[in-house]
């Protein structure tokens, strides 16, 4: 401790530099990336001066005491120093070639339905559409990408604080069962997503069903779905399993037991999570299953009543899963979420 204090007396800037932090640490050579710098000494940081390789940030916004968001100026590719009123972060930010997707700057968010103007036919004459609304509840602007960020021209909306956008019109990629949104890291939890599935052929019966939007941190190697109703006379039951890496296939283990306890009705290790469209060239995700009803796949469930379903992986893969129970008469969907 004495040695540390003595070192600080000799080099105040060095101690300040050790306290400063920046995230993300990479961005495009064209500038315009939002970078959070913390550890500043200011209380009201609205007047803080932030420079990248000597060039002032395009804009500096106070987030909290000692924390600002700085919008990067343009600069040739390479590592540069960030200078602040409190010292220098040596080679604290690296500029990369324009158009490069920097995965470490983003968190994946699963939207388990397709978006856009397309409508999809369902059972019993139903016609389905989905709608997504996005609100940025952060105290800063944040970037959000859809679909394939490696080829994402025209689909990189920067959503300002409090702004609400209709995701149906800014999503560039579509697939039959969903989409990925890539949210600027550190901003994901501040976003509110409202996703609805609607049977537009029966709009007078119900306005739609709220569907989950799932953060990357919620993916696990084992998912438990409790108290799933098996009602083959009145409903269709579909199990969906998602994976964030669509580049390959892998097996999942499905165990279905009676809700009241007892021996497993299904113990299946042969089910495969299939790759998404494009064999991994599109950064979407895979899904398990087809349009088949769960009871059609496992007839032994016909009289099960209510069951528990556990879906797990044997390797390093992370998955997320839910069950959709669709009423045959009304087409109303009930979702059973992980616990």
Image (spheres, rainbow, N blue to C red):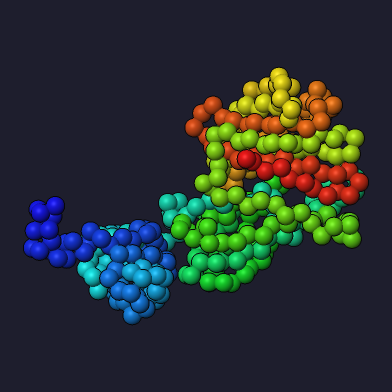
Report x, y in % for residue 193. Answer: 63, 59
Residue 263 lies left or right of residue 279; in this view the side is right
Residue appearing at x 23%, y 70% in the figure: 86
Q: Residue furthest top?
A: 263
At 25% from the left edge and 60% from the top edge, which residue is drawn?
A: 19
- Who is closer to the viewer here, 272 or 324? 324
Position of the C terminus, as image quadrant, is top right
- The outermost residue toward the bottom is 47
Q: Is residue 153 visible?
A: no
Determine whether 270 is above or below 40 in the image: above
Asked if residue 186 can be seen in this view, the reply is: yes
Left or right position of 284 against 150: right
Q: Whole-percent x and y of residue 327?
A: 86, 44
How far across and down, in percent of the image, does residue 243 sit? Answer: 58, 40
Left or right: residue 320 versus residue 326 is left
Q: Nearer the viewer, residue 158 or 339?
A: 339
Q: Residue at x 61, y 36 (%)?
A: 223
């Amino acid at each position: 401790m004495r040695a540390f204090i003595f070192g600080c007396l000799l080099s105040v800037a060095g101690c300040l530099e050790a306290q400063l932090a920046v995230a993300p640490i990479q961005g495009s050579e064209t500038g315009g990336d939002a970078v959070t710098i913390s550890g500043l000494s200011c209380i009201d940081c609205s007047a803080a001066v932030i420079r990248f390789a000597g060039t002032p940030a395009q804009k500096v916004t106070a987030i909290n005491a000692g924390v600002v968001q700085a919008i990067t100026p343009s600069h040739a590719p390479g590592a540069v120093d960030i200078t602040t009123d409190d010292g220098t972060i040596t080679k604290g930010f690296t500029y990369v070639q324009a158009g490069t997707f920097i995965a470490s700057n983003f968190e994946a968010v699963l939207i388990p339905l397709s978006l856009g103007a397309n409508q999809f036919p369902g059972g019993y004459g139903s016609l389905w559409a989905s709608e997504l609304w996005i609100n940025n509840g952060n105290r800063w602007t944040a970037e959000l990408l859809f679909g394939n960020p490696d080829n994402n021209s025209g689909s990189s909306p920067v959503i300002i604080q409090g702004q609400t956008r209709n995701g149906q019109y800014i999503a560039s990629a579509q697939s039959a069962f969903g989409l990925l949104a890539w949210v600027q890291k550190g901003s994901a939890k501040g976003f509110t997503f409202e996703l609805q599935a609607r049977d537009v052929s029966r709009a007078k019966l119900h306005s739609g069903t709220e569907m989950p939007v799932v953060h990357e941190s919620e993916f696990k190697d084992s998912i438990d779905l409790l108290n799933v109703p098996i009602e083959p006379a009145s409903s269709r039951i579909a199990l969906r399993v998602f994976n964030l890496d669509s580049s390959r296939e892998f097996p999942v283990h499905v165990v279905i037991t009676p809700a009241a306890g007892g021996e497993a009705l299904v113990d299946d290790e042969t089910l495969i999570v299939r790759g998404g469209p494009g064999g991994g060239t599109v950064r979407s995700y895979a899904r398990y299953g087809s349009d088949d009803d769960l009871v059609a796949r496992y007839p032994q469930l016909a009289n099960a009543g209510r069951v528990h379903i556990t879906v797990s992986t044997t390797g390093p893969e992370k998955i997320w899963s839910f069950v959709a129970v669709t009423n045959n008469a009304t087409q109303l969907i009930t979702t059973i979420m992980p616990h």
